[in-house]
Image (cartoon, coloured by chain):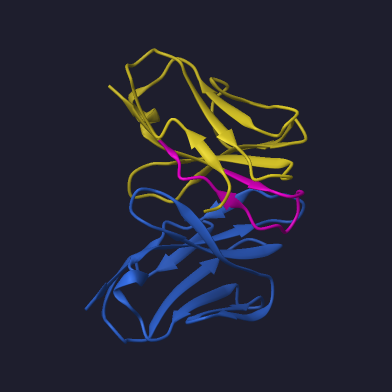
Chain colours: A yellow, B blue
């Protein structure tokens, strides 16, 4: 148990739809990062939030957006879903920005049909 | 070329064998992480290191900063060690993890 929970665990959407994935950080952790893991690949960094502000972004289009709330929980929103968005979406929380262990949730598996 | 390369991609061992998984990286790093991912997706952090060697139970991680190389060793391997082992690095001033593709380990009884 890492103390990081993600919801939902599985989700099926159709192309063009929008989706919101949620992450509840470990207590006291002010930093959350989101990753996309395609089948058979390592996770790819989407973005990171630190104290409610975006603090770095990977090579993902603007239709991937996020939010971090005052309680440090977080959302990942994806608009205009494409088939290639099918993946496991992982969030990870940590305390602070530098050289801290990240604690991962179990992920949300998104299938886009 | 990926910034983080792991070898081998797949590894099958018999219970009790000594396992080594290798990771090479091509960028400057602030820390290197070894993580374990079980079927179903959950990722667990095993080690974070920036120099030397760390040990936890049957797991040992080493890093050579000059050679930009790290190894994860598992002594007396057990079927419950079967998982994907992932090497990832963080670069100065950022918590962004850059991942290798992982090594799938299967330990047979």
Q: Is residue B67 left or right of residue A78?
A: right
From the top left corner, tell me how far across and down residue B3 is, in percent: 54, 57
Residue A24 picture quarter: top right
For the point 31% across and 87% down, the residue is B16
Start and end of the magenta stretch?
A: A92-108
Front-most of residues A39 and B25 = A39
For the point 51% across and 45% down, the residue is A105
Front-most of residues A27 and B37 = A27
From the top left corner, tell me how far across and down residue B86 is, in percent: 46, 61
Residue B46 picture quarter: bottom right
For the point 63% across and 61% down, the residue is B27
Q: How many marks?
A: 0
Front-most of residues B44 and A46 = B44
Front-most of residues A74 and B24 = A74
From the top left corner, tell me how far across and down residue B49 is, in percent: 65, 70
Q: Is residue A22 left or right of residue A16?
A: right
Q: Is residue B44 left or right of residue B96?
A: left
From the top left corner, tell me how far across and down residue B41 is, in percent: 40, 48
For the point 58% across and 22% down, the residue is A62
Quadrant assignment for the C terminus of chain A: top left
Q: Is residue A99 magenta?
A: yes
Principal secondary structure, stretch drawn in magenta: loop
Q: Is residue B61 magenta?
A: no
């Amino acid at each position: 148990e890492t103390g990081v929970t993600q919801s939902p665990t599985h989700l099926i959407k159709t192309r063009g739809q929008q989706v919101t994935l949620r992450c509840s950080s470990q207590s006291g952790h002010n930093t959350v990062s989101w990753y996309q893991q395609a089948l058979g690949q390592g996770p790819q960094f989407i973005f990171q939030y630190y104290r409610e502000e975006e603090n770095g972004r990977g090579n993902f289009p603007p239709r991937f957006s996020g939010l971090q709330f005052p309680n440090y929980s977080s959302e990942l929103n994806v608009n205009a879903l494409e088939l290639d968005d099918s993946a496991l979406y992982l969030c990870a929380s940590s305390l602070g920005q530098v050289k801290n262990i990240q604690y991962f949730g179990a992920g949300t598996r998104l299938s886009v049909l | 070329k990926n910034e983080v390369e792991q070898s081998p991609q797949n590894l099958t061992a018999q219970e009790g064998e000594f396992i080594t998984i290798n990771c090479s990286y091509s960028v400057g790093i602030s820390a290197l992480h070894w993580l374990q991912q079980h079927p179903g997706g959950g990722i667990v952090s095993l080690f974070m290191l920036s120099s030397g060697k760390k040990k936890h139970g049957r797991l040992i991680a080493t890093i050579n900063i000059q050679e930009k190389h790290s190894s994860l060793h598992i002594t007396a391997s057990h079927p419950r060690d079967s998982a994907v082992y992932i090497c990832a690095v963080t670069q100065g001033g950022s918590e962004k993890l850059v991942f290798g593709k992982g090594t799938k380990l299967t330990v047979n009884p």
